Amino acid sequence: MFKKIIAIGMTLVFVFSFAACGRSLPYDDYDLEDYITVGEYEGLEVEKYTIEVTDEEVEEEINNRLQAAATTEEVSEGVVEDGDTIIIDFVGKVDGKEFEGGSAQNYSLTIGAGQFVDGFESGLIGAEIGGDPVVVNVTFPEDYALNPELAGKPAEFTVTVHSKQVTTVPELDMDFIKAQGSEAASIDEYKEAVRAEITVQKEKEAIDEQKAYLWNKLVESTEQKTGEDGEPLYPEEELDRVTNEFKEEYQTYADQYGMEYGEFIEQQTGMSEEEFDAQIKEYAKSVVLQEMILYYMVDKEDIKISKDEYDNYIKEQLDDMGMDEDSFEQAYGQSFEDYMTEDVIRRTIYLDKVTSLMLENAVQVDELSEPAAEGEDAATDAAEETEVEDGE
């Protein structure tokens, strides 16, 4: 899990959600033009999107909702079928004697899951729930590693099946539709309402992709000022801040596992502490560059966040999680605002406002322009500079 987190963090080019920091970023104390020359952000090309929702997607979404509304109950009658989850007692014997680990009570077993030695689960199919004990004969495999003393030996299990779980999936009918809070007057109308919901979600995702593309183009086209050594300039305090935050996060992971930082990093990443710290520094440069671009744009365009916008963002995030303020606080032990921090919430809103502005001023095209080919003459190059390009 940690390797995946690290891989994502280290290869991130477009940082749409900045790392949490829990403190205000003092970029107002910097003249950002000492560090960057922000690229053109008006009139950029962005590819048009089309939204299509198939009948199969509608059926899949409705089926997911039906499955989510399914109920499960324990029953003590019927017979065991493949795929059932059953509650059993069992006693295993080899050469007429019970063996260690061969007995259990009230054990939950899913038939067909392969939890037991071959023949055990299939031997219970057809057994009566709540009936007399069933005897199942199996033979341990020759390479049985869990207990080599049992390898290759026949065993007899006496099994009592107490109950099984029965899951009932509701039908797609008007009772289900009303229970979903839908105002649809028929099943067909409900399907069309679901189609409309999927369409809205797909459109949101498509717009987010456009915003991500435009932000990436802006980052790529922004020029960084360089120092006397020819290296890009960064506010060192901000580089240290992001670097330390990232290291502190992984120090927390190490502490949770009772490990030294360097030992934890090597185990999880295969890198030495020095190699990992070098990658963190590069990651911090990417974050700080994008923060500088963001706050330059916020200042240049005089972008503000109203209280309603701030409150609505929190509500939307909670709605997406299927929670409200009270349920979130019960689950996480603090409010959403405290959990995310006001600074992170504001930066997320600022970023959405900046990318929305870029999208409003973008040129929607069917196909993005190709990058300029090598060897084109100066006249062609000059002409292309006046056009919106896909960008190198």
Image: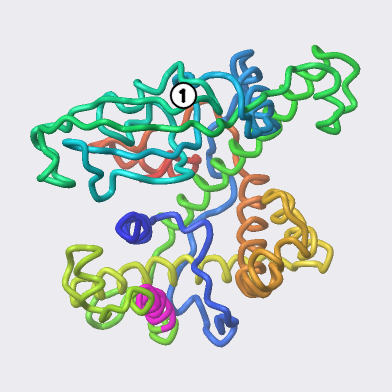
Q: Position of residue 270 (x, y in %)?
A: 17, 63
Up the image or down, 311 lies above or below 178; here it is below
Residue 354 left/right relative to 240: right
Residue name at image x 58 percent, y 28 percent:
49
Residue name at image x 34 percent, y 40 percent:
91
Q: Nearer the viewer, residue 127 or 19?
A: 127
Up the image or down, 248 lies above or below 7; here it is below
Residue 320 left/right relative to 17: right
Question: Disc 1 designates what residue?
Answer: 83
Residue 26 left/right relative to 151: right
Q: Nearer the viewer, residue 64 or 382?
A: 64
Q: Quadrant of the C terminus?
A: top left
Q: Position of residue 272 (x, y in %)?
A: 16, 72
Identity, as a three-letter code, of the amino acid under mark 1: Gly
Q: Is residue 234 visible?
A: no
Magenta extent: 241-253
